[in-house]
Amino acid sequence: MSYRLTVRHDVESDLQRVAAEQIGRARQALEQESPVDAIHRLRQRCKKLRALLRLVRPTLGKRYAGENRRFRNLARSVASQRDEQVLIETFDALMRRYAEQIDRRHFSAIRRQLQARRRHSLAAAKKSEAGNEGAGEEGGDGQASALSETAALVAVLEQALSAVPNWTLSARGFDAVGEGLAESYRRGRRAWKRARRSPTTSELHEWRKQIKYHRYHCELLRDLWPAEMKTRSREAHRLSDWLGEDHDLATLRASLDDDVMAHLGMRQRAQLAALIEQRRQVLSTQAFALGRRLYAEPTKALHQRFARYWQGASGKS
């Protein structure tokens, strides 16, 4: 089965099935994929699991807080391992986008510094982990440390999986998901309005988080009307990607002012900052144009419309 709830099935059993599948796939990635890919997959699964929880939050009750905290903390525990790599990927994507306007070699020193930052971050993480475990020998410590970290992450996932049968709901049918859907969409509209008034990096980032929840909710509910849910999910994904790129560019821009970058040429950094700003302006224009369409409908109207879709899809109309 896939990441979806089926309207003709019991929502509670579907909820537990989807959760177990996502946890299982996260564990499979940790055990079978490269560390970089595994961490990326783990974070993706945690986001999907948190979106699933948010969809049923009002009917899941007190269990929501603990389960949401579990997957939030799990994703945060590996975030730093991905963040430094994202800076390099963002830099490379910017170079490719403006390849015809610039001489990439002019910025090679900045890329080398970003690579050095990543190596330093990874070395610091490994040293900290080795210290926590009392490791002092050279040689196999790196591999042992990686295996230990994987085992710790797998243990958290096993605990999460064992708790899934306790994910019980106080409502059935659309009532099990409708209020959570509406509240998530409402938060997205509010975040969109705040970002329009004050398009700061933090406000745009918060808006993006809410968009991702709505995207995943459309995926989970695509049985309501597959064509429309697929379109909304795809457009929300597009919007999320644009805002994600904007956030990565903002982080890259901030890194240019770090002490470790200070010894590099001011002209190089200024030129890169100008390219970043140029791209961010394009992304902002695109994002707000799409956001106006995605969040055009009042929350109550969307809730009622989706309820009618559920009724029709379940054959009860």
Image (cartoon, rainbow, N blue to C red):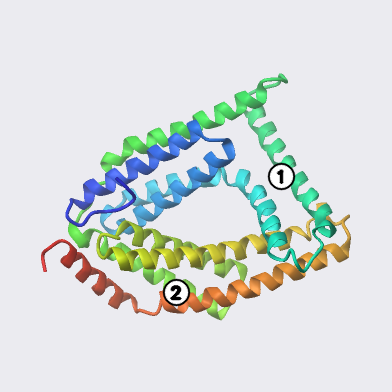
Dot 1 corresponds to which residue?
A: 118
Relative to 37, residue 262 above or below:
below
Relative to 313, residue 53 above or below:
above
Q: Nearer the viewer, residue 245 or 93?
A: 93
Residue 58 falls left or right of residue 117: left
Residue depth check, mark 1 versus mark 2: number of the one nearer the observer: 1
Mark 1–mark 2 distance (CA, rounded to whole Å): 36 Å
Q: Nearer the viewer, residue 107 or 189?
A: 107
Q: Which residue is located at x 44 percent, y 68 percent?
A: 235
Observer able to see residue 184: no
Q: Residue 190 carries which label?
A: 2
Other-residue count near label 2 (Cα within 10 Å), few / some / many at <14 / 14–19 / ≥20 = some
Relative to 195, residue 139 above or below:
above
Circle 2 — which element? helix
Relative to 51, residue 287 above or below:
below
Circle 1 — which element? helix
Whether label 1 touches label 2, CB < 8 Å: no
Q: Which residue lies furthest to the front in this view?
A: 100
- Amino acid bearing label 1: Arg
Quadrant holding the C terminus: bottom left
1 or 2: tag closer to the N-terminus: 1
